[in-house]
Amino acid sequence: MKSQTEPVKLIIKNGWVICPVCGKGKILKINPDTSVHHLPRPCKRCGQETIVNIEAPEPASKETSA
């Protein structure tokens, strides 16, 4: 199994991270608040391992200025 080391932009379709190598395999199900760092995920279709890094968006501040 090969490991991909150079950073690539992940494709997300319907809440799934799609394999950047074959473009067909679903490698990880995510929610809007998902945050992961250095998570190795193999693709079941092509066998390529991808290191996944996902930053959760900053929560919107509910404070108002007076």
Image (cartoon, grey):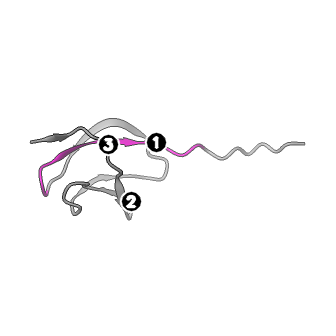
Precedes in sequence: disc 2 or disc 3: 3
Q: Quadrant of residue 38?
A: top left
Cα–Cα span, label 1 and label 3: 14 Å
Give the residue number, with chain letter if any, for mark 3. 7
Instruction: State the quadrant of the N terminus.
Output: top left
Cα–Cα span, label 2 and label 3: 20 Å
Instruction: Determine whether 23 is above or below 9 in the image.
Output: below
Q: Is the residue marked by circle 2 packed among few (<14), some (14-19), or many (20+) residues within 10 Å?
A: few
Precedes in sequence: disc 2 or disc 1: 2
Give the residue number, with chain letter if any, for mark 1. 55
Asked if labels 1 and 2 touch by Cβ distance under 8 angstroms, the answer is no
The residue at 17%/39% (across/down) is 3
Residue 22, magenta (yes or no): no
Give the residue number, with chain letter if any, for mark 2. 15
Instruction: Determine whether 31 is above or below 53 in the image.
Output: below
Q: Secondary structure at mark 2?
A: loop
Residue extent of the magenta highlight: 45-58
Work out which residue is located at the far left of the displayed protein and give it.
1
Asked if labels 3 and 1 touch by Cβ distance under 8 angstroms, the answer is no
Q: Secondary structure at mark 3?
A: loop
Residue 55, magenta (yes or no): yes
The residue at 12%/55% (across/down) is 46
Work out which residue is located at the far front of the displayed protein and give it.
6
Instruction: Determine whether 24 is above or below 31 in the image.
Output: below
